[in-house]
Amino acid sequence: MNKTKNILSLSMEPEMQELLKKHAKKKGISVSKLVRDLVEKFLVTDEEVVPVILKIPNQLKGNEEALQKWMDARSNAIVKALSS
């Protein structure tokens, strides 16, 4: 049998595992696939890139004015942080 993936064991709180299961089921994928996707998404392999992750509150969805105000505040903070 030719293995194409290595096995990794993780420890986490039961609540976190349940969240992973819930999101994987919602996406129609396995928990392992979800974890692989998350790791791939957030690993930086290009040293010429500075990763920035924004978690946007759900209540801003559909409210263009509030979303723009929220994004402006975050983008100004990012510019300030990266400029110093």
Image (tube, rainbow, N blue to C red):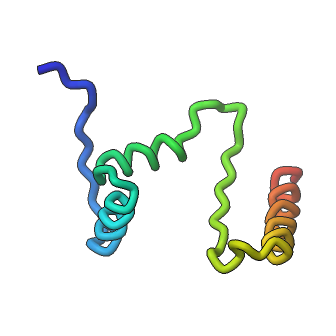
From the viewer's perspective, is 52 left or right of 76?
Answer: left
Left of 14 or right of it: where is 62?
A: right
Q: Please identify the residue farthest to the bottom as the structure is shown.
A: 59
From the viewer's perspective, is residue 71 above or below residue 44? below
Provide residue 44's location: percent of width, then percent of height.
Answer: 58, 38
Q: Position of residue 78 (x, y in %)?
A: 81, 58
68, above or below 66, in the image: above
User: How many tags in the picture?
Assistant: 0
- Residue located at (88% from left, 51% from top): 83
* Residue at screen point 26% across, 25% down: 4
Name the quadrant of the N terminus.
top left
Q: Residue at x 70, y 37 (%)?
A: 49
In the displayed orientation, state which residue is furthest to the front: 62
| Residue extending farthest top | 2
User: Residue 58's spot in the image, x, y percent?
Assistant: 62, 75
Q: Which of 73 and 59 lies nearest the eye of the viewer?
A: 59
| Residue 61 in which image quadrant | bottom right
- Residue at x 38% of width, y 44% of height: 36
| Outermost residue toward the left in this view | 1
Front in this rendered view, residue 74 or 9: 74
Residue 15: image quadrant is: bottom left
As drawn, 26 above or below 5: below
Q: Is residue 10 left or right of residue 84?
A: left
> Which picture quadrant has residue 77?
bottom right
Q: Is residue 44 above or below residue 62?
A: above
